[in-house]
Amino acid sequence: MKLPATPELDDLRVFCMVARKSSFSAAAEALSASPAYVSKRMGVLEASLGTRLLHRSTRRVAMTAAGERVFAWAEKILDDVGQLVEDVSSTRRIARGTVRVSSSFGFGRKFVAPALAALSERYPQLSVRLDLFDRVVDVAGEGFDLDVRIGDEIAGHLIAKRLATNYRVLCAAPSYLARHGVPRTVAELESHACLAIKERDHPFGVWRLEAGGETVAVKVTGPLSTNHGEAAVQWALAGRGIVLRSIWDAQPLLDEGRLQRVLPEVIQPANVWAVFPERLAQSAKVKVCVDFLAEAFARAGLGGAGFAVHDDRESEPIESISI
């Protein structure tokens, strides 16, 4: 009896991306390859294993029962191979290969993208892929090495390094406050037009605020809401309501007098974090990327950086690396 051929690691990588994306074209985009290449590698993998792994349709692909089993094994195999390479090769000391980074639309465009461009120039052996989303990313499950996110609620199984100090503030245009008055308490926000933003790390339409050392949750409403922070800021500038926005975004407008702080003693902590899976704690490319981002954000005036591990166990810092 002829045994199935041993699958190629690259084919397993392609299959895992197809499984995560449920699409050949989306997987091809993520891999910087063509859909034809992805389709060919899937055909080779299925032939080598002697079983169908995917149900194909014109709109999407779905895993078969065999595909589900292979996916679980493939993720473990690829993870173990990555650990092996990091443990015994020079990549532990030299940043090389591809680092996949995710972040949010506004912060990613304004700060992360320019920093990564400078990182790529400094470390030519490092290839950088940046994806921007309006949702919280499953870093390991979606194949990312690093997520740059704003907000302090981070899952306990992930490692995080604080890249910059940040907080959100309430603000509105002077024209809005002249027409509707200035709220004097958090509770009064409920009777104002508030510009809710569907952000990655907090419930839509609920603002959890800190005032005097206490946390208060307030349900806000208004005629306008969005999933894009820049749109909400434009509405605020037009006098359409009160917005809760990160100080890095709001401060220039406050300095110009185009916006005005509302309840200046009230903030929402929302620091900037680099979040990555525990298995990448010793990765040279992740360490170089995290350290470079912290330096770049400090130069941009976004605040200081410090380690924080989001579980209750002792954690050793990523070791020093000589480049």
Image: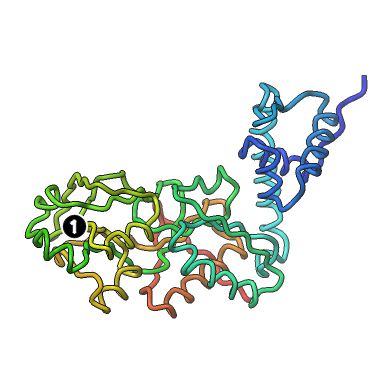
Circle 1 SS class: strand
Amino acid type at mark 1:
Glu
Quadrant occupied by the N terminus: top right
Residue neighbourhood size for the residue with mark 1, other residues' Cα within 10 Å, grouped as few (<14), some (14–19), many (≥20): some
> Where does label 1 land, which residue?
210
Locate residue 279, reporting x and y percent.
57, 51
Quick check: 265 left or right of 77? left
Locate residue 297, reporting x and y percent.
44, 73
Q: Nearer the viewer, residue 297 or 38?
A: 38
Q: Residue at x 14, y 59 (%)?
A: 211
Q: Which residue is drawn at 35% across and 48% down?
A: 198
Q: Is residue 311 visible?
A: no
Quick check: 143 left or right of 186? right
Instruction: Indicate whether 120 appears above or below 170.
Output: below
Locate residue 88, reporting x and y percent.
71, 59
Question: How many marks do you count on the picture?
Answer: 1
Quick check: 61 left or right of 255? right
- Return the residue found at the far right: 1
Q: Nearer the viewer, residue 316 or 180?
A: 180
